[in-house]
Amino acid sequence: MLTLIKGAEIYAPHFMGQNDVLISGETIHRIAGTIAACPEYEVRVIDGSGKYLFPGFIDSHVHILGGGGEGGYRTRTPEVMLTDITTGGVTTVVGCLGTDGTTRTMAALLAKARGLEEEGITTYIYTGSYQIPVHTLTDSVMNDLILIDKVIGTGEIAVSDHRSSQPAKEAFTRIVADTRVGGILSGKAGIVNIHMGDGKRMLSFLRSVLEETEIPPGNMVPTHINRSMALMQDGIDYALRLGGLIDLTTSSDPNFLDEDEVKASTGLKLALDAGVPQHQITFSSDGQGSLPVFDQDGRFLGLGVGKVSSLYREFRDAVRVDGVALEQALLPVTSNPASILKLKSKGQIAPDMDADLILADQETLEIDTVIAKGRVMVAGGQPIVRGTFESLI
Ligand code: ZN
């Protein structure tokens, strides 16, 4: 099947101007000023005039299996559905377990990731759990990375949080070391995705890895950096001084931001203005994760659910509200996560890359069309491909 997108203005994420894009099967075949639809072949033509064409977004931290449970069993959050992902312009997700590594298992996470892949998007997972010792599929993080294709790293490991297993620094460092070596031996990223809590130790675990070992900063992605201004500032310092990566979480309700919480779009602007190199910053949604609210004494007050669609919202707000340039605002959700996670065919619009694409209105930046591996998943802002059980509702 050939698909021809005509006349869209391309941000690849770098600006390429108005071009036609020919998709063959699951892959981008050709990009040129004008490409004629060849009458000998059946070609589906999509009108891209008045639209931007972006790479499909990569969401590197999603609780695809559901998460939560901090308020008891009934607060376990539901599994993600295909259209929760695609309608938010996301075509690649990395799934992880969360606080609950007991009733949520690695085997179920792998099965869910495979299910979503069958439904049309691209999926990966992190092995491990909030807790150390970590939960794995085989007997170790390193073996999981080397033996299981979908495993590209470890996470989310919780530090500086009252919900963490309060690991010793040595135990944490060992996880990072094993993940790095597992990545090297399997040709994968070997990334540790690290849940940052609001504890006073902030990024001290990661600093000690960089200061006391030979491990480089590219193997650790601390997430939820924008959960407080103090952590945001520590993250900026960590990025500037040590070359560390920082990941901002988009799933907070802008209407109910914690007192000190920094909206991801604003955090991006802050980090860029502070001089953090643009390739060191990513966004992830924390989709389907619980958003528990605790009082000052740590008592549970209530719970919300993170949404994958918040990733696109924060990208859009970065451009429209916080004044970040479009090219720059795309980096944390496209080419940055692709290169950090070593997803070689993702995150860019170029020949031979996967045909993961978003068409968005040039005026409003609203999503019009989403294509995942050459298949139109969303058209006219509406899902046209639904998950297996969504079609029954
Ligand atoms: Zn987390």
Image: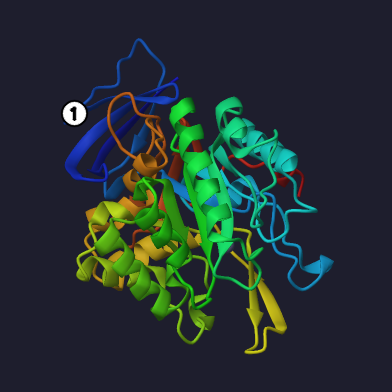
The residue sitting at 66% across, 41% down in the picture is: 387
Q: Is mark 1 within 8 Å of ligand 1?
A: no
* Ligand 1 image-quadrant field: bottom right
Identify residue for label 1: 34
Q: Position of residue 238 (x, y in %)?
A: 33, 64
The one nearer the camera, 213 or 318, is 213
Q: Is residue 159 left or right of residue 348?
A: right
The one nearer the camera, 325 or 166, is 166
Q: Quadrant of residue 101?
A: bottom right
The residue sitting at 47% across, 61% down in the picture is: 223
In the figure, 7 relative to 201: above or below?
above
Say what secondary structure mark 1 lies in: loop
Q: Quadrant of residue 241?
A: bottom left
Q: Position of residue 201 (x, y in %)?
A: 48, 73
Q: Quadrant of residue 70?
A: bottom right
Farthest residue toward the bottom? 296
Mark 1 is on which residue type?
Answer: Thr
